[in-house]
Image: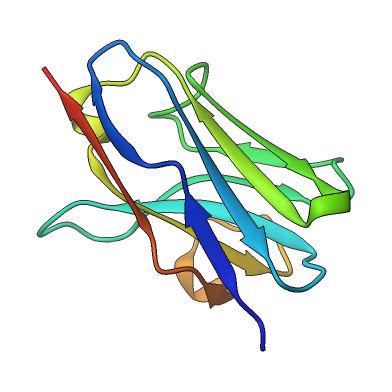
Amino acid sequence: QAQLVESGGGLVQAGGSLRLSCAASFTYYTMAWFRQAPGKEREFVAALRRSGDGTNYADSVKGRFTISSDNAKNTVYLQMNSLKPEDTAVYLCAAGWHTSARPYDYAYWGQGTQVTVSS
């Protein structure tokens, strides 16, 4: 059964850092991170291809967040630095075929991990 399991969320002060992990039970082609705050639509954060030759970031996180992968572990990471209160959301990883910013392009989703940034 295809599964994605996120970890690494928590509570951090503004300006702090967190690293999220997403472990896949299968060999993915593209992995992405999205986030969803209460009452808001799901928002694209970052994506990368397993081959490592393509990454994509939302403008709101460029220069602060870095997506990376360990293919031997089928795990993707999201290093989040200089966190802001507006980064507070449930962060979800998703697997698909293209480095798309559209949620419906991804077939598999994790359950999410909460990130809370206090001011």
**Quadrant for the C terminus in the image:** top left
Residue in the foreground of this view, choosing between 108 and 101:
108
Q: Is residue 23 rendered to the left or right of residue 40?
A: right
Residue 108 % position (x, y): 57, 76
Depicted 74 relative to depicted 1: above or below: above
Residue 26 % position (x, y): 77, 73
Res 116 → quadrant: top left
Residue at point 52% right, 16% down? Answer: 63
Seen as rendered, the residue at the extreme bottom is: 1
Residue at point 73% right, 60% down? Answer: 30
Residue at point 17% right, 57% down? Answer: 40
> Looking at the image, can residue 73 be seen?
yes
Depicted 107 relative to depicted 90: above or below: below
Residue at point 75% right, 42% down? Answer: 69
Res 79 → quadrant: top right
Res 98 → quadrant: bottom right
